[in-house]
Amino acid sequence: MHKSLVVAFLFGTIASMQLSVSEAQTRIPGWNRVAPPGGHQNDPQLVRAKGGPVVPIFEGWFPNPDGTFQLCFGYFNTNTDEVFDIPVGPNNYIEPAEFNGMQPTHFLPQPDGGRRHYCVMSVTVPADWGDRDVRWTLVDELTGQEFSSPGRLVHSTYRHDEPLQPSRKNSPPKVRLQAEGPIAEGRVGFGRGMVSETLEANVGEPIELTARVRRDNPFRDDDDRAIRVRWFKYQGPGDVVFTPNWSSWREEMVGWIAAASWQSSEFAYGEQKTQAVFSEPGEHIVQVQAYNNAGRAAYESQDFEFWCCWTNAFVKINVK
């Protein structure tokens, strides 16, 4: 097995992942790259159609109202076409073991612009966690190389404003998975994020999923930006096909919910429905992500604010 490579990140950027440990310490063009709208976040030499690894990334932390903390992780699939399924186990694990099992096992290709999948998972640590690490490791099955990212509370530069971001007068959507169910708000992961009651489905038969969304922005009375809803497979065997395919980044204006659908009443929610079909039986988790249109009309089909503000929620489905 290749020597384990602990991937280091500085302000959310990524170093070279195909070099040796010593070579990776040398900065490459694009280090600390900040992408403009429609631009490329990571150096193009890291990107390929297939054959590259998936790398876990510690994105940052934020406090919870009860005194605990969230450590937020995402991932960078270096491939534009290749999808990975890495079950929880020796090639996909979190330490300490008490947090293992909360991470995704399905890894989507890189979105347009060379960006990564941001804050898809988080873990809750107690108020007295101190300077200990939560470490997520993924192993490239082809090379045996390990990619490991430690999450920790010690660096204030990694603190997120959550769920509100006063500096940008921004707030995330609210999501309900049942009409009168609990409300999710913010980019928490499966460990703490709002999870629906377990649904039942059969292999090959569609099950309808509904996300109900609204936004109550305390900083702007005239916040009429649309909300986009996207669905993903998070955990489970086999394939999941969503119809319509709201998860696509490339479909023009797909999945947007107009503000008029919830602004008529403080109790109103805009709805977006999709049908999911599962190819194999087993316990599945699908993720729904609701995020704001940042207002750049030319890039609405891939618009996403990586620092704020969006909401994660999760649906458990037992497929027979």
Image (cartoon, rainbow, N blue to C red):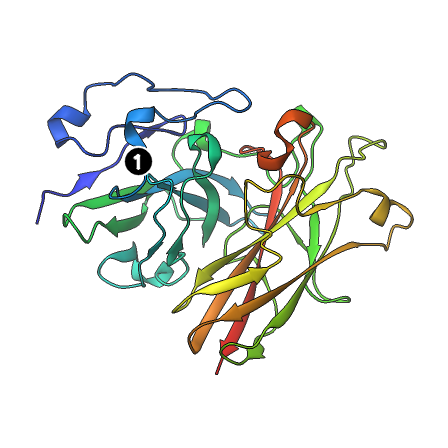
Q: Residue furthest right?
A: 264
Decide: is 284 above or below 244.
Answer: below
Q: Residue furthest top?
A: 29
For the question of whether residue 110 can be seen, the reply is yes
Q: Image point 45% across, 42% down: which residue?
A: 117
Nearer-the-camera pick, 207 or 13: 207
In the image, 12: left or right of 243?
Answer: left
Mark 1 neighbour density, 10 Å: few (under 14) some (14–19) many (20 or more): some
For the question of whether residue 304 can be seen, the reply is no
In the image, 285: left or right of 264?
Answer: left
Nearer-the-camera pick, 68 or 7: 7
Q: Image point 29% across, 57% down: which residue?
A: 93
**Image quadrant of residue 205?**
bottom right
Decide: is 102 above or below 79.
Answer: below
Residue at mark 1: 48
* Residue 257 x %, y %: 75, 46
Mark 1 residue type: Arg
